[in-house]
Amino acid sequence: MTAHFQGETSGPIQVQTRQWSREEIETRIGRVIKWVLIVLFVFLTAFPFYWMLNLSVRPLPDVLQNPTRLVPTLEQLANFAEPYRAVLVDYNFLTFIGNSLLLAVTTVTLTLLLAIPGAYATTRLDFRFKAVMSWGILLVYMFPAIVIGIPLFVVYTKLGWRGNLLTLIIVYLSSTLPVALYMLRSYFQTIPKELEEAALIDGSTRLRTIWLVVLPLSIPAVASVALYTFMIAWNEFLFALLFLVETRPAWTLPLGLQQLDSQEVPKTMLMAGSVIISVPIIVLFFFFERFLTRGLTAGAVKG
């Protein structure tokens, strides 16, 4: 495109205007769409948590009178600790946090102790029915929790094992161990065998090779499994309801949160309890995010 201008002391001036190619236009449009989608995704994921946090610091009369208020007042922010104190102390959430933490940490520890050698065995060792066992690991995980919930309830009731955290630990192990084995097995297949063979030639035992060679290279996968297992044990509600509902001192956080969902308890307390149960998972996710991404995608090439 050429534009002509007539100056007072000179002749016509030609201005060259650069035309964008189709590829440049598509690239710019793609960037705009990308950032629009990112902003939309962040809004859709962050706004519910912000709204829950907003409702938790506002008194119930203000919520009823101004249900769409997006920002709490300064006075409400100054007294934000009151609903959390009530939830933690009056509704016994401190005990529930301790129970959930003990349950989650124990489940994670036992799952890793069993899943790491088990996944390594199905990856590196040769034995009969190896393929059947590998597929069976995944098939066990495909059973919904509701299908095995009632049989487990009947069995543990007859054995007298209801009402304690040990029962839940056993149940959670049966739920998390299959997928932990599958995730670690896929990751172990990406580790070169030559590294382990070199350690074995140098006189290292199999267990020492796993500890010194395999595990340092598998930190992303191990962190992913630990985070997944912790989330299951921290948030699980069905089995906790089946086995602990009659034993209040052994309640976990999901059961404690359920008691707040009633007509007698202000909904602001329910929001405060929801924040308490959500924050640890959010913090752990951001801390393990880089390990989680690498651990979930590393087994996509092999395995």
Image (cartoon, rainbow, N blue to C red):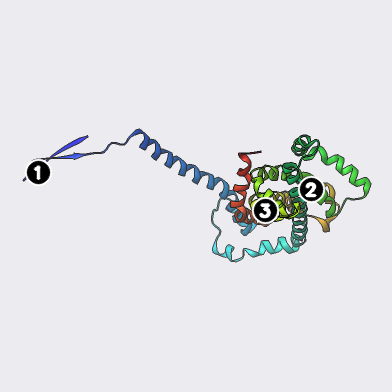
Judge depth for marks 3 and 2 and give the one in front. Answer: 3
The kind of residue on which mark 1 rests is Gly
Distance, label 1 to label 3, CA atoms, is 77 Å
Q: Residues within 10 Å of mark 2 (few under 14, many from 20)?
A: some
Q: Can you identify the residue that label 2 sits on?
A: 173
**Label 1's element?**
loop
- Mark closest to the chain's N terminus, 2 or 1: 1
- Mark closest to the chain's N terminus, 3 or 2: 2
Q: Nearer the viewer, residue 22 or 153?
A: 22
Quarter of the image holding residue 5?
Answer: top left
Q: Residues within 10 Å of mark 1 (few under 14, many from 20)?
A: few
Contact, mark 3 vs mark 2 (Cβ under 8 Å): no
User: For residue 187, which numbered disc appears in the image?
Assistant: none
Number of numbered tags placed on the structure image: 3
Q: Is 45 placed left or right of 251 in the picture?
A: left
The kind of residue on which mark 3 rests is Val
- Mark closest to the chain's N terminus, 1 or 3: 1
Q: Residues within 10 Å of mark 3 (few under 14, many from 20)?
A: some
Quarter of the image holding residue 126?
Answer: top right
Q: Can you identify the residue that label 1 sits on?
A: 7
- Residue lying at the far top in this picture: please name it: 22
User: For residue 213, which numbered disc appears in the image?
Assistant: 3
